[in-house]
Amino acid sequence: MQFGVVTLFPDWVEQVTSVGVLQRASEAGTISVTGFNPRDHATDNHRTVDDRPFGGGPGILMQLSTTQASLDAARQALPQAPVVFVTPGAAVRSTAGARVGANAAVDSAGRALRRGR
C-alpha cells in the first residue's frame, strides 16, 4: 500500500517509517510512504505557505495555491488513491470504522493524506 502525505514536515514522514512495525513493513515492501511539501510549490523567495484568515482575526491558514499544487502532486503520484483529510474535528474512529477502512484499503491503490495546520 502506498501513502502520500501532504505536510510541511516531509522529513517526519521518512522518520516514521524508520522504526518499529512501520520500518519492517517498509523494508518488506508492504507499505511505501512519500511526503509532499507545499513549500516546494511556493512562488516567492521565502517559500511562503501561510495565508491570512478572511476578515482578519486570529488563526493561520494555508495558501490554497501551494496546498492544491502539493495535493495535485500527490494525486499524480497515486492516481487511484482516495484523498483523506485528517482533522481534529472529525468523528471519533471506532474499531468497526477501522475495519471498514482497512477493507477499502485492500481494494485501493493507497491513500493521499492531507491534514490541516
Image (tube, helix red, strand yellow):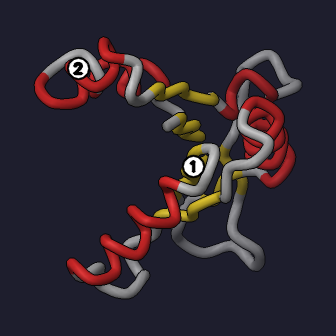
Quadrant location of residue 16?
A: top left
Question: Going by the image, does 87 lie left or right of 66?
Answer: left
Q: Crowdedness of circle 1 by 10 Å Cα count: few (<14), some, many (20+)?
A: many
Is residue 90 visible in the rendered image? The answer is yes
Q: Which mark is residue 13?
A: none
Quadrant location of residue 102?
A: bottom left
Count of picture labels: 2
Q: Which residue is mark 1?
A: 111
**Which of the marked residues, 2 or 1, is nearer the chain's N terminus?**
2
Position of residue 16 relative to residue 63, above or below, is above
Q: Which residue is mark 2?
A: 23
Name the residue at 56% across, 64% down: 85
Is residue 7 visible in the rendered image? The answer is no
Position of residue 16 relative to residue 55, above or below, is above
Position of residue 84 relative to residue 62, above or below, is below
Question: Going by the image, does 107 lie left or right of 77?
Answer: left
Q: Amino acid at mark 1?
A: Arg
The one nearer the camera, 36 or 79, is: 79
Q: Crowdedness of circle 2 by 10 Å Cα count: few (<14), some, many (20+)?
A: some
- Farthest residue, direction left: 20
Name the residue at 23% across, 20% down: 23
- Label 2 – label 1 distance at C-alpha: 18 Å
Name the residue at 67% across, 58% down: 82
Give residue 117's position: percent from left, percent from top. 50, 55
- Farthest residue, direction bottom: 91
Give residue 21's position: percent from left, percent from top. 15, 30
Position of residue 116 relative to residue 26, above or below, is below
Name the residue at 63% across, 29% down: 36
Question: Going by the image, does 114 lie left or right of 82?
Answer: left
Q: Amino acid at mark 2?
A: Gln
The one nearer the camera, 80 or 44, is: 80
